[in-house]
Image (tube, rainbow, N blue to C red):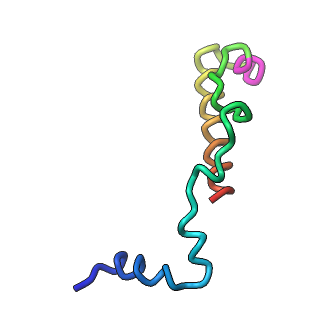
Amino acid sequence: MIHPLELLDRWRRYLPGAHRWRRSSAGSALSPEQDWLREPATVEEASALYPHLSEEQALIRYQRFRLGMRMNRNNRLS
């Protein structure tokens, strides 16, 4: 008996829009020079955005914020 996901994998190649399944991340990724999210988060930026938190808490919150931005951008591109 064939697994349902294997069956889907076989049939999706013949469905309209099959090219969407074959995309690679290299085509949608920004170059490292343009991707400011690759730069390390700084305490100065974090403290400026979250002045009511301690430096450590501000940095953690800022890193979560940046990670959320990265995930949202990746979801929009896929």
Q: Which quadrant would residue 16 be assigned to in this image?
A: bottom right
At a point 70% along the width and 35% down the height, the residue shown is 35
Residue occupying image coordinates x 49% and y 79%: 13
- Please, is residue 20 above or below residue 55 in the view? below
Q: Is residue 31 above or below residue 9?
A: above
On the rendered structure, is 67 left or right of 35? Answer: left
Image coordinates for residue 71, horizontal then vertical, percent: 61, 46
> In which quadrant of the rendered view does residue 45 lie?
top right
Q: Residue at x 34, y 77 (%)?
A: 6
Position above or below: 21 against 8: above
In front here: 72 or 11? 11
Magenta region, mostly helix, strand or loop?
Answer: helix
Q: Which residue is located at x 70 percent, y 21 percent?
A: 46
Horizontal and vertical percent position of residue 70: 64, 42
The residue stretch that appears in magenta: 45-51
Q: Tally the marks.
A: 0
Outermost residue toward the right in this view: 48
- Residue 61 is situated, as x and y percent measured from the top left of the image, at 62, 28
Lateral position of residue 47 relative to residue 5, left or right: right
Write down the quadrant of residue 30 in the picture. top right
Which one is in front, 4 or 52?
Answer: 4
Name the quarter where the C terminus is drawn: bottom right
